[in-house]
Amino acid sequence: MQGARTCHEAVAVLRENPAPILLCESKLPDGDWRDILNESSLLGGPLFLIVTSRLADEYLWAEVLNLGGYDVLLKPFDANEVSRVVRLAWSHWKAASQRTNLERNTRKAAV
């Protein structure tokens, strides 16, 4: 697991080490979680973006979900909630990866 302090650093890390789950502060020095989500969509593969914020509210949660993020975690973190959200994101990523592999294999078999 590698950390980054800016959007630019985060995208560079994702290019070098693609990750299925990313925790991202809602605001970064050079942008915000939307920038990370937009840039990561160009890298391919499913990314489950979990936004963290001290000001998490229903508006932020709805915006994150509507724009393709996975969830929002309120800071300061509750260890049980972080564990639950990351575990669910991992489970959804595995299921999405299995579906993608199955579809890919079905297309290859049809050719």
Image: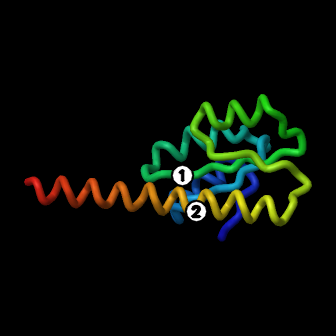
Disc 1 designates what residue?
47
Where residue 23 sits: x, y (%)?
70, 55
The label shown at residue 79 is none
Between the C-alphas of marks 2 and 1, the distance is 10 Å
Q: Quadrant of residue 104?
A: bottom left
How dense is the environment of label 1, judged by Cα within 10 Å: few (below 14), some, or many (20 and up)?
many
- In the rendered image, the quadrant that contains the C terminus is bottom left
Disc 2 designates what residue?
90
- Outermost residue on the bottom side: it is 1
Asked whether the residues under the numbered discs 2 and 1 touch, taking CB atoms below 8 Å apart as contact, a structural biologist would say no
The answer to whether residue 49 is left or right of residue 32 is: left
The answer to whether residue 107 is left or right of residue 89 is: left
**Residue at 64% over, 56% down:** 22
Q: Which-is-in-front pick, marks 2 and 1?
A: 2
Q: Secondary structure at mark 1?
A: loop
Where residue 37 sits: x, y (%)?
59, 42
Between 80 and 20, the residue placed more toward the observer is: 80
Where residue 101 sits: x, y (%)?
32, 60
The answer to whether residue 55 is left or right of residue 39 is: right
Q: Amino acid at mark 2?
A: Trp
Q: Amino acid at mark 1?
A: Leu
Q: Quadrant of residue 64?
A: top right
Where residue 52 sits: x, y (%)?
78, 48
**Residue at 53% over, 56% down:** 92
Q: How is the image coloured?
A: rainbow
Q: Secondary structure at mark 2?
A: helix
